């Protein structure tokens, strides 16, 4: 599998689809310009009218986008809370959660990205997501069904997939897409307000008790009614095509993340097995707000839709064949793995020999190195650490104390 070529193809297609989003906004401006020219009885190419329409549409889309992005400004924890996720305590003694924390920490070391906040969604489906503006405010969420049903290799593949979203800036792109869609929806929202206003206005345009100029008032009501209908319909048409583009963007980023997960773990069977289990069970989330973040999930979390027009994920067989053409479903055990992993350091398998620290490139990025699988290096590094140091590094103050202690130690090896 040439995952580097697949990554490059996915990036090119994503750039083209994001361009289509901009063209969709331009299309909304043109359609509204034509409609309002008919309402006002002036040429559609009147420069002043076009300027007002363009300014109004851009202002509405901007306001709607900023409102949504402000809602998500606190990072990935907002999305996790929206979906009913509960944050995992780094010192948890639950075996499933302990295994999850270990895998996330391994991927963090392997990628050079800070450990994100971890949330578990109380959902029996097999799914996961990464959300946030950047590596510093990221949250990874995973369903209870995933951590109970997936083996360690499969869980590692899923987490590697989500770390790919973090490293390639997909989270920021996802939040911007959510903002743009909300901005286009805001046009329809304003149209609905105008329709409600005209519903409560008397047909003569004056107060219901005072009368008025029936001809002039009636013209105002009809103008507002026409404007409301135009904004409402064009807004929803824009949302329709915006959702199509959002789904297409998401599909390309899923291919990119799948290919990157194989690159990071060097184990296509892990993520392929997780995808196969989604097909055997389900990825559909029960949260009433699951649709809002449908393009962020590892698997299709909202079920099938009409002709799969808005499918945010490629078909599972297509994803599996792309990363593992010779995948054998009979090798996948669909029964939940036994909870063998303990919180005790002694229960861990003997780690493989660590590569020389001098071979690590600047910045601490292990990915793409041919000497050793990056996640294997991370797992071995974690397993080689004393238990007290693993606990210390999860808190800022104790991590600083640990670093100072090592620096001040009289033993040369410990200082190194």
Image (cartoon, rainbow, N blue to C red):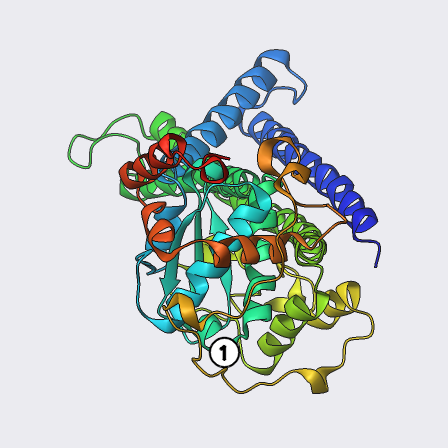
Which quadrant holds the N terminus?
A: bottom right
Q: Nearer the viewer, residue 151 or 183?
A: 151
Give me the residue at 33% from left, 61% from top: 84
Q: Position of residue 385 (x, y in %)?
A: 45, 53
Question: In the displayed image of the protein, which residue is found farthest to the top?
Answer: 48
> In the figure, residue 386 lies in which quadrant?
bottom left
Q: Which residue is mark 1?
A: 149
Judged from the image, the secondary structure of the residue bearing numbered disc 1 is helix
Seen as rendered, the residue at the extreme left is 209
Residue 298 versus residue 378: which sits nearer the camera? Answer: 378
State left or right for residue 37 relative to residue 314: left
Q: In this rendering, is residue 213 above or below 76?
A: above
Where residue 73 appears, as percent x and y from the top left, is 38, 35
Q: Residue at x 78, y 63 (%)?
A: 322
Evaluate whether residue 183 shows in this view. no
Q: Position of residue 173 (x, y in %)?
A: 57, 39
Percent across and percent down for residue 278 are: 58, 75
- The residue shown at (36%, 68%) is 343
Q: Is residue 5 above or below residue 64?
A: below
Say how many tags the image has. Answer: 1
Q: 203 or 143: which is nearer to us?
A: 143
32 or 159, which is in the foreground? 159
Q: Residue at x 65, y 44 (%)?
A: 356
**Mark 1 packing: few (<14 Cα in 10 Å), some, or many (20+)?**
many
In the image, taking residue 58 as reference, residue 394 lies left or right, namely: left
Q: Is residue 144 left or right of residue 236?
A: left
């Amino acid at each position: 599998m040439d995952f580097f070529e697949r990554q490059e193809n996915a990036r090119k297609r994503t750039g083209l689809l994001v361009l289509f989003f901009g063209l969709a906004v331009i299309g909304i401006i043109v359609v509204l310009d034509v409609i309002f020219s008919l309402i006002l009885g002036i040429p559609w190419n009147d420069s002043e009218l076009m300027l007002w329409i363009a300014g109004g549409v851009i202002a509405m889309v901007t306001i709607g986008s900023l409102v949504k992005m402000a809602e998500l400004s606190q990072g990935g924890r907002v999305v996790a809370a929206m979906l009913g996720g509960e944050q995992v305590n780094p010192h948890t003694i639950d075996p499933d959660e302990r295994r999850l924390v270990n895998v996330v920490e391994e991927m963090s070391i392997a990628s050079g990205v800070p450990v994100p906040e971890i949330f578990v969604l109380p959902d029996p489906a097999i799914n996961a997501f990464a959300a946030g503006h950047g590596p510093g405010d990221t949250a990874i969420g995973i369903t209870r069904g995933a951590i109970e049903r997936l083996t360690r290799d499969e869980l590692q593949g899923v987490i590697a997939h989500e770390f790919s979203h973090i490293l390639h800036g997909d989270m920021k792109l996802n939040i911007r897409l959510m903002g743009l869609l909300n901005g286009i929806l805001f046009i329809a929202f304003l149209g609905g307000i105008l329709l409600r206003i005209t519903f409560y206005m008397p047909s003569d345009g004056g107060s219901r008790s005072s009368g008025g100029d029936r001809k002039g008032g009636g013209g105002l009501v009809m103008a507002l009614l026409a404007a409301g209908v135009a904004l409402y319909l064009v807004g929803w048409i824009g949302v329709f095509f915006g959702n199509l583009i959002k789904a297409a963007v998401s599909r390309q980023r899923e291919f990119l993340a799948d290919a990157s997960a194989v690159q990071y773990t060097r184990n296509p069977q892990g993520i392929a097995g997780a995808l196969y289990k989604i097909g055997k069970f389900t990825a559909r989330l029960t949260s009433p707000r699951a649709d809002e973040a449908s393009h962020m999930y590892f698997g299709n979390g909202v079920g099938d839709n009409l002709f799969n027009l808005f499918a945010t994920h490629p078909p599972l067989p297509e994803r599996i064949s792309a990363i593992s053409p010779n995948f054998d479903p009979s090798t996948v055990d669909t029964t939940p793995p036994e909870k063998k992993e303990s919180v005790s350091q002694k229960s861990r398998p003997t780690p493989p020999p660590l590569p020389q620290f001098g071979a690590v490139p600047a910045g601490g990025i292990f990915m793409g190195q041919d000497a050793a699988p990056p996640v294997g290096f991370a797992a071995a590094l974690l397993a080689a650490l004393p238990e007290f140091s693993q606990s210390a590094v999860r808190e800022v103050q104790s991590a600083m104390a640990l670093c100072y202690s090592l620096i001040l130690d009289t033993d040369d090896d410990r200082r190194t």
